[in-house]
Image (spheres, coloured by chain):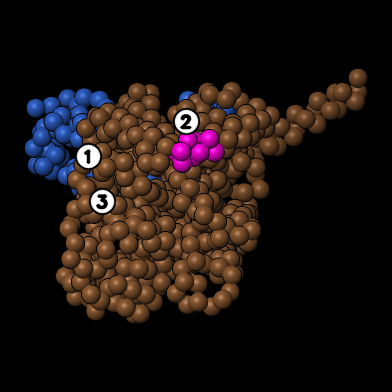
Amino acid sequence: MEEKKIGLPSAIATGVGLIVATSCLMSLGQGAGSIGITFIIAMVIACVFNLITALSLAELNALMPNLTGGLAQYTLAALGPFVSVIAMVGGYLVCNTICGAVECAMFGNTMNSVFKTGLPSSVFCVILLVVLIIANLYGIDMFAKIQDFVAYGLIFSLVIMGLIGMFKAGTGTVVNQPYVLSSSPKDIMSLVGLAFFLFLGCEFIIPIAPNVKNARRNVPLGMVLSLLIVCGMEVLVILGMHNYTKWDELASNTSPHVFYGVSLLGKAGEYWMAIVSIFAVVSTVNSVISSLSYICAGMAKINLLPAVFEKRNKHGAPYVGILMIGGLMIIINATGLSTTSQLSTMILIGCVFWMAAYAIASVDVLIFRKRLPKAPRTFKVPGGPVLPILGIAGNIFMMYNITADPDARRMIYIVVLIIFAALAVYATIWIKKVMQIPLFKPIPVHKVMAMENDMYMVVRRKMRAGETKKVTAEGSAS
Amino acid sequence: MGLTKIEIVTSLVKIDSLQKVLGKLGVTGMTVYQAMGCGTQYGAKEYEVEEKNETPALLPKQMVMVVVDDAVVPKVVDAVEKELYTGHIGDGKIFVSPVSNVIRVRTGEEGLDALK
């Protein structure tokens, strides 16, 4: 049996590493700068909705353990291949590739604003991506080593900087300002969509579950602890921001986290926050490249993507996915994304698909409770159907409140619909022509589990090749 | 209070973890048989899941037999189910049947006393 290599600390690092991104730090500053510390309420609401989703995913993982593709396979069994392809290819592959590329772009901008090298920002992006691609090609061990280092470095830095700020122990000038700029429920709720982005990504622990020791306990626990750690960390940072950065300056700054670092500790703070940004980007992009490549391999295994994504190198790394995802991010950045003003819009577009995927996870839970009520579950979301229903409603609410600006919201929805249409065309053609199964017919759970076996598709492809040869031979004979 | 026999058919790889779970539940004894068997798939491999073998092909299994107090049967069955469950074909089966008596040969004790 293959040795399990990842313990609970590394599982948490994977979750935290994906969740905390430079774009999160930017959103944190903008949110807090808009309404003051009442943004914490919006954050807690968003964290709760994400916890519900994490619990739903934990129940799905208990019902269908150790599947490489994660939500793709759960949804395949619950709602059929069409929804599975849209949710996964749209919600994860496309949008995480975009979000990862945006992260790299922000990293390049941060490096230039702090170190003023004069080099184009995209140079830093490309160098970082090349390093991470190479590291991930060395397999899950290398990914975990990098992830542990940067994620715990990130947690440590943000907690310390938050505490220094909260206790007014910084070298900068303490600012006197009200804690609260707005306590209106309307203002708070309008920022829940922004706050939601601060917590997306804990489920990236699931694709690496087969490599996690005591996965039954550590996968759900890792997801929940990642969210709680991130929430706690960000609350500390907001309290620190109150003491050292004027709210209006924070809200209008393009790198509010760097601004906080400078205000808190001067030049040392600027460099420290630059390091935090590096850690955030590295951990996010590292998680994205690794987890997405495993998701692609899992989807290829169940024939939702071409078989080439299953190929692994001698280190066991799904190299085709790694090269494709990393390569796409390089192309996006090399074409000048760093200089675009559309960074935050692209993030929000990605978020809408991500929230849809989260809502689908809760739908899957309810479907399986109806269809397989007696199947043993080592974990079950407490409270009956209440929390999954709340999760679905919360995610739809987030999508509706993705941004307070109605024009921007309309634009986001238009782009989402265009991407959805393209995915729907791909899904229909792929499912009808390649998979040759009905679009919306769920695949039984035991068959989806069987698909995880390496021999499953090998046997089927041989069978189809044999049938094709037979039909061709009969055609020639007649 | 009555006695119940629980017979668990499981794969060879699960026996160690099953022993640990039964030990934690306070089960005071177990008997393990090496067995050969098949289920509704007639021994077909998991990746051949759409096809059933024409004749049953027997696969190596282990049968674990425990006798417990009626009151703990739901707890034991639930724990065994959760331990054995992988979602894959071949997770096994649990048979539950009543036992009229148990006798400890050395002391002549009967019923629940023979299990303590």
Side (left or right) of A456 relative to A187: right
Amino acid type for the residue under numbered disc 2? Ala
Q: Mark 3 or mark 2, which is nearer the start of the sequence? A: 3
User: Residue tagged by mark 3?
Assistant: A35
Q: CA distance from mark 3 to mark 1?
A: 11 Å
Side (left or right) of A364 relative to A118: left
Rendered position, A106 above or below A115 = above
Numbered label attached to residue A77: 2
Residue at 59% in and 43% down: A300
Q: Quadrant of residue A473?
A: top right
Query: Nearest the camera: B34 or A34?
Result: A34
* Main secondary-structure element of the magenta-colored stretch: helix
Q: What are the residue bounds of the magenta stretch?
A: A407-415
Q: CA distance from mark 2 to mark 3?
A: 43 Å
Assign the C terminus of chain A to one quadrant of the image.
Answer: top right
**Image spot of residue A140 (x, y percent):** 49, 61
Taking the image as drawn, is residue B91 in sight?
no
Numbered label attached to residue A32: none
**Image spot of residue A189 (x, y percent):** 28, 40
Badge 1 marks a residue whose secondary structure is helix
> Which mark is in front, 2 or 1?
1
Is residue A217 highlighted in magenta?
Answer: no
User: Residue tagged by mark 1?
Assistant: A185
Residue at 55% in and 61% down: A338
Taking the image as drawn, is residue A306 in sight?
yes
Amino acid type for the residue under numbered disc 1? Pro
Q: Mark 1 or mark 3, which is nearer the start of the sequence? A: 3
